[in-house]
Image (cartoon, rainbow, N blue to C red):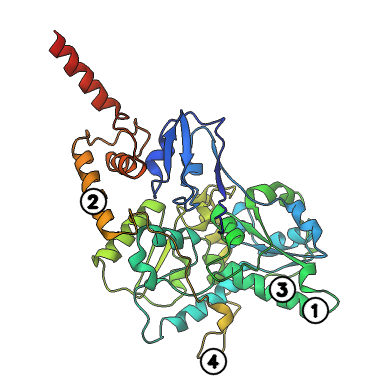
Amino acid sequence: MHTYEHSVLLDASKCTGCTTCLKHCPTEAIRIKDGHAAINQTRCIDCGECIRLCPHNAKKAVFSKLENMKRFKYKIALPAPTLYGQFDNLDDVDYVLDGLIRIGFDEVFEVSKAAELVSAYTRLYLKTDGIKKPIISSACPVVVRLIGLRFPSLNDNILHMLPPMEVAARLAREKALKENPELKAEDIGICFISPCPAKVSYVKNGFADYKSEVDEVVSISDIYFMLISEMSQDNDIKALCESGIIGIGWASSGGEATAIFNENYLAADGIDNIIRVLDQIENGNIPQLEFIELNACPGGCVGGVMAMENPFVAKARLQSLRRYLPVSQNFIGNDNYIPESYLFNELPEYQPITRLSDSMAQSMRMMADIQKIKNNLPGIDCGACGAPSCRAYAEDIVKNKLNFDGCLIMNERSRRKETDNDS
């Protein structure tokens, strides 16, 4: 059986059991046990929210080191558009792209270039008869996994389009093989430079029946200082940039949605906000929309925990940088169909976290038991028991057959009652 490999891990030696992560995990994947946090791997969606909020740096993102690329003869860098927002006073993307060549890559293929192609085909996808609307973007792997675990009824709304990272990886490999016929496919290594740990998990695990074309994922923060020391400030740089406003706009919330050229869209960022939006879609409490863009990180990909710069600063820099660019440099011509290589067939299968048992009768009994226990709890969701809420604690008792003695408030009330009776 395949074990899902996560990219968000806990360093127990730094954890104090403070409950900050416990209260903010969107899938209630964290419990406090034996004085420190424990992550339920089946519920974790690698959103990085615990990394962002932990005051003790006890959570960390796991990613590849650039040295891993040495095993390939031909090395291709895939810079996420977020990378361009990390540098102050940058007025030309080519400085960054040229810097990547200087640190050892043989070629650079912009993810923003692939994003412009994905945007064009998404506009075509929205015109397809029979698709369930609103269409929810599949670009953020956190959102796709969150829907599978918490909102499985919305699976049919997910856009079956591969994310720009994957399209870029495929196109880059094809280009390298065409221009370098002496190379074999296995000689070529493709490295995505990412702001997001969820992309690491995506590459490690694949996507349902789809195996990622990316070989390694390195962190923007890990490569930043190496890159900035090699970025030339003279005019002797190659003109490598092949993307425009649309592609680079994908780095910030709303960039993907505005590129569909349709006013009936919604763009939300931040894990709490996207959960509220998904709740509204599921309950039908949302206007008629064509397209919904959701980014787990605040501000969009610029808010990823593997980025260097403050997301609001990075977003402002990208806005300034886009002034010098054309709207787009990548077009699909008069195509009236979407190539199969841009689509995925199946979504990953996850067991919804609301499913208590495979048996309906057993689930009903467990739900009744959970409600009965919850009614006897204080209902203040203090987290002292090690669970994020009284409802979650009641579920832990029923599912894991725990003793009903972990609630400190109930224990204190019982102690006081016994003391009063003795007196």
- Report the Cα–Cα distance between label 2 and label 3: 54 Å
Mark 2: which secondary structure? helix
- Report the Cα–Cα distance between label 4 and label 2: 57 Å
Q: Which of the two marks, 1 or 4, is nearer to us in this view?
A: 1
- CB of mark 1 within 8 Å of CB of mark 3? no
| Residue holding disc 4 | 334
- CB of mark 1 within 8 Å of CB of mark 4? no
The image's mark for residue 365 is 2
Mark 3: which secondary structure? helix
| Residue holding disc 3 | 173
Q: Percent position (x, y) of residue 203?
A: 61, 61
Relative to the observer, which residue lies in front, 304 or 215? Answer: 215
Mark 1: which secondary structure? helix
Q: Which of the two marks, 3 or 4, is nearer to us in this view?
A: 3
Does residue 413 appear anywhere in the picture? yes
Question: Which quadrant holds residue 214?
Answer: bottom right
Residue at the spot 37% in from the left edge and 87% down from the top edge: 129
The numbered mark, 1 or 3, whose residue comes first in the sequence reads 3
- Report the Cα–Cα distance between label 1 and label 2: 64 Å
Q: Percent position (x, y) of residue 408?
A: 30, 26
| Residue holding disc 1 | 179
Identity of the amino acid at label 3?
Arg
Identity of the amino acid at label 2?
Arg
Q: Percent position (x, y) of residue 111?
A: 61, 67
Q: Please indicate whether residue 134 sits to the left or right of residue 365 in the image.
A: right
Q: Percent position (x, y) of residue 25?
A: 41, 45
